[in-house]
Image (tube, coloured by chain):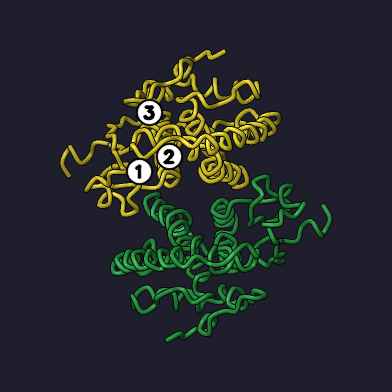
Chain colours: A green, B yellow
């Protein structure tokens, strides 16, 4: 195996929440990574070779190609246990995984995917104009999600319990994509806003806050740590 | 906690692949369970209380309510380790989780959900007639998936490696829903057919093979162990 094969490299797309969760976990664990931005919708020739599912993110790590964001971050947590982002007991770990699935399935289907599709991807892919009804439905749905998170945070320091976990980074990955285009109603819940301000101020968040997607300007508060 | 609270109970829907994967893992681990069939599309009043996501399956287990199928089966594997359905090394576990996500995300989106929606759920929910183009697209997609599984099984005894794992039960859960309505082209790959025949013949599969959904008849070979 030559030196080049050993470089940790993430094939990603800047405003994909699934890619962002992997970037955040890599950074939290202080794993240096080379980022390669991929225009996956143009089916780059090597994408299917790296990941037969034809999806991003793909992580080249220690000579292996890893795919599927949740599988990747669980692998990283098992192999680079410091800092640990999974709690000790099976019941607590269930809660972390339940909330990761909450964001990657439910929140993504009701909020991230429709809003990003209409307001970002259609523009980048030049595939049409945003459908304002779809955006409106997404913005309505996000309110219910913020209320649910508020109910969780009333009894917990972090989303899945009293320790920072993969669930916080998964949730923050979705929120940060929406925050880039200013589509989070942070005034709805002080608790959720404080939770996001806290995780956003971690050094692991810095690279994500420096993202500049060509043609899509970040909201003025996107990279501000004190966004009051 | 009274005795009733202690009963293991799965709130499920018979032809949901996500419910089936939990049933199969429970049975493989010889955990006795009381099944409660839920018509989730009618939003039963207690569903959101048991699982704020409003989805099935929900498992009441040791006094807790567990949700999200992958989080549930990982929890079961951690707490009832015999037989273990996760391999030893982090890289092997990554492969199991990658393939679980393959089926629950990609296979579900391209095959299970569209075909079951058109051929089963529209009938059960009385929400319209099947769109044959959608069914045809699903049946075309399943061929590519069978070819991919064939390529995996050429080098492995089970889907994720040489030991039976959560990935096999996840895949079998999806295939068994489609097989109920006879929508799997088993002639396409002897290897995939043999893999399914082997897993289907396990005692854990028996309860699933006994399913009878009112108004939807199982295919003649659905419950046959030697379906040659």
Question: Which callout, 1 or 2, points at the residue further toward the start of the chain?
Answer: 2
For the residue pair A59 and A40, the one nearer the viewer reads as: A40
**What is the secondary structure assignment of the residue under circle 3?**
loop
For residue A213, side relative to residue A182 (left or right)? right
Instruction: Quadrant for residue A125, please give it.
Output: bottom right
Q: Does the image show residue A87?
A: no
For the residues bearing labels 1 and 2, Cβ distance under 8 angstroms: yes
Distance of mark 3 from mark 2, alpha carbons? 19 Å
Mark 1 to mark 2 CA distance (whole Å):
8 Å
Q: From the viewer's side, name the closer residue of B75 and A101.
A: A101
What chain is tagged by disc 1? Answer: B
Q: Is residue B180 above or below residue A145?
A: above
Identify the subunit bearing mark 3: B
Which quarter of the rendered picture does the C terminus of chain A lie within? bottom left
Task: Name the chain letter of the residue that bears numbered label 2.
Answer: B
Specify few, some or many for label 3: CA neighbours under 10 Å numbering under 14, 14-19, or 20 or more. Answer: some
Give neighbour class at mark 2: few <14, some 14-19, many 20+ (Cα, 10 Å).
Answer: many
Q: Earlier in the sequence, mark 3 or mark 2?
A: 2
Residue visible at 55% across and 31% down?
B164
* Residue drawn at x 49%, y 61% as measured from the top left: A114
| Residue B30 tag number | 3
Residue B56, disc = 1
Question: Is circle 3 on the same chain as circle 2?
Answer: yes
**Are discs 1 and 2 located on one and the same chain?**
yes
Which callout, 3 or 2, points to the residue nearer the camera?
A: 2
Which residue is disc 2 drawn over?
A: B18
| Residues marked 3 and 1 touching at CB (< 8 Å) | no
- The residue mark sitting in front, 3 or 1, is 1
Task: Give how far across and how far down residue A142 sits, in percent.
Answer: 39, 66
Which percent across, then down, holds residue A183?
46, 73
């Amino acid at each position: 195996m030559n030196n080049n094969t050993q470089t940790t490299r993430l094939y990603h797309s800047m405003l994909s929440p699934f890619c962002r969760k992997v970037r955040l976990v890599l950074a939290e664990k202080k794993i240096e990574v080379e980022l390669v931005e991929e225009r996956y919708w143009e089916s780059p020739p090597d994408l299917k070779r790296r990941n037969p599912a034809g999806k991003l993110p793909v992580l080249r790590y220690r000579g292996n190609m890893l795919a599927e964001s949740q599988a990747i971050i669980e692998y990283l947590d098992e192999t680079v246990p410091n800092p640990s982002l999974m709690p000790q007991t099976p019941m607590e770990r269930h809660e972390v995984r339940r909330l990761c699935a909450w964001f990657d399935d439910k929140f993504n289907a009701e909020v991230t995917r429709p809003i990003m599709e209409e307001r970002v991807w259609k523009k980048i892919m030049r595939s049409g104009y945003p459908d304002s009804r779809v955006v409106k439905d997404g913005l309505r749905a996000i309110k219910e999600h913020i209320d649910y998170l508020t109910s969780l945070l009333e009894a917990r320091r972090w989303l899945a319990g009293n320790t920072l976990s993969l669930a916080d980074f998964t949730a923050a990955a979705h929120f940060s994509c929406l925050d880039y285009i200013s589509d989070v109603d942070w005034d709805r819940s002080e608790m959720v806003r404080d939770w996001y301000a806290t995780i956003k101020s971690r050094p692991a968040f810095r690279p994500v806050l420096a993202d500049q997607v060509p043609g899509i300007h970040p909201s003025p508060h996107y990279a501000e740590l004190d966004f009051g």
